[in-house]
Image: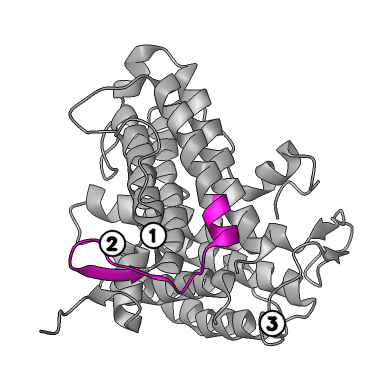
Amino acid sequence: MTDFLLRQMRHGTWANEQLLERCRALTAEQLELTVPGTYGTIRKTLAHIVASEEGYVVRLLGLLLHEPPVREQDLATLDGIAVHIPHVASAVERLFAKGSLDPDRVIADTPLRRAGAPRFEMAAWAPAAQFVYHGIDHRSQIDTILSTHGLETLDLQVWPYAMELGASREAKEVR
Amino acid sequence: MATPALDHVLRHNAWANKTLLEFCAALEPAALDLSAAGTYGTLYGTLQHIVGGEQFYLRLLTDEMLGRPVRKTERRTLEDLIAIAALTGARAIDVAAKDDVARVIAPGEDQTTVGIVLAQVVHHGNEHRAHATTILGSNGRATPKIGVWTYGIANGISRNDGD
């Protein structure tokens, strides 16, 4: 049986991929749209989602995914953002390669910590749960920006993801 | 069986609902009619939808209606929504701990699984809570901190305030 949290994190990666493709259909000007009360522009928000997710999985794995590590401010283009979505997807699979996460395992530090920055110890469940929360929160903001400006939005709920996987479907009665 | 890590995802969901609802209950009543373009609706309508949606999902999972049904056509007090959210939040945690995530449930002609509905519970709550904070922020209001970092600190199980 697939770990439930793994499914939840895979849904996040799937939603990011869908959103990236939607963003590729936007003009450069549309990518810089925003609305008050959200994180920033569409492009900046998508960069924030992906860079943060790399940060969460790096903390969970205790390993950098690549050198140099990604920083949000470096992700100025969709192509630049796109490179990192598979990094996150692959890291998520590695996290669960040996089974479920131990939620109470204390993570002493992150390889991404900058010199002089405070060190946080935290249980593994915290960045894992934050991964799920954070992506949905900011994808919702992009959805808000798109619809506010009269642009087509996406259905990124779990339902279409499950339908795509065949995990949810209309039941056909056999007579 | 669900993992304890998922348990925290669902505990955060219940805590975030409670925190947001209590924050909004302390606002002047007119604030509940605030809205922002591109979100679900008014602040009140969004809160009602969060709670009503979760009530619906838990009914799919358990065949039980927790609290009186939340309907779009009836305005309920926030205290009432807080009480229902407490029931559904606790029950979702219980379902995740005890139910089989692969168990097929078939509401009407649609077929899905316990795991998919639980994942949707998490998605739906986070998405619409983001709408609520967008409405508050876009109207120049303070917003409650309802992320997982704050959940960890509020419950005395984490000291990290985000990175």
Whole-number angstrom distance, CA of label 3 to CA of label 1: 35 Å
Task: Have a look at marks 3 and 2 and say if they share a chain.
Answer: yes
> Visible in this render: residue A4?
yes
Mark closest to the chain's N terminus, 3 or 1: 1
| Residue type at the position of mark 2 | Gln
Would residue A83 be found to the left or right of residue B110 on screen? right
Residue B61, x across and y down, in percent:
40, 56
The magenta span reads B93-112
- Which residue does the numbered mark 1 point to in the structure image? A42
**SS assignment at label 1:** helix
- Which residue does the numbered mark 3 point to in the structure image? A99
Which residue does the image show at 66% across and 81% down from the upper left? A96
| Residue type at the position of mark 3 | Gly
Q: Which residue of the protein is positioned furthest toward the left in this rendering?
A: A175
Which residue does the image show at 46% across and 50% down from the upper left? B126
Residue B43 shown in magenta: no
Residue B65, x across and y down, in percent:
35, 41
The answer for which chain carries disc 2 is A
Q: Quadrant of the N terminus of chain B?
A: bottom right
Q: Looking at the rendered structure, which numbered label has been put on residue A30?
A: 2
Task: Have a look at marks 3 and 1 and say if they share a chain.
Answer: yes
Which residue does the image show at 89% across and 57% down from the upper left? A116
**SS assignment at label 2:** helix
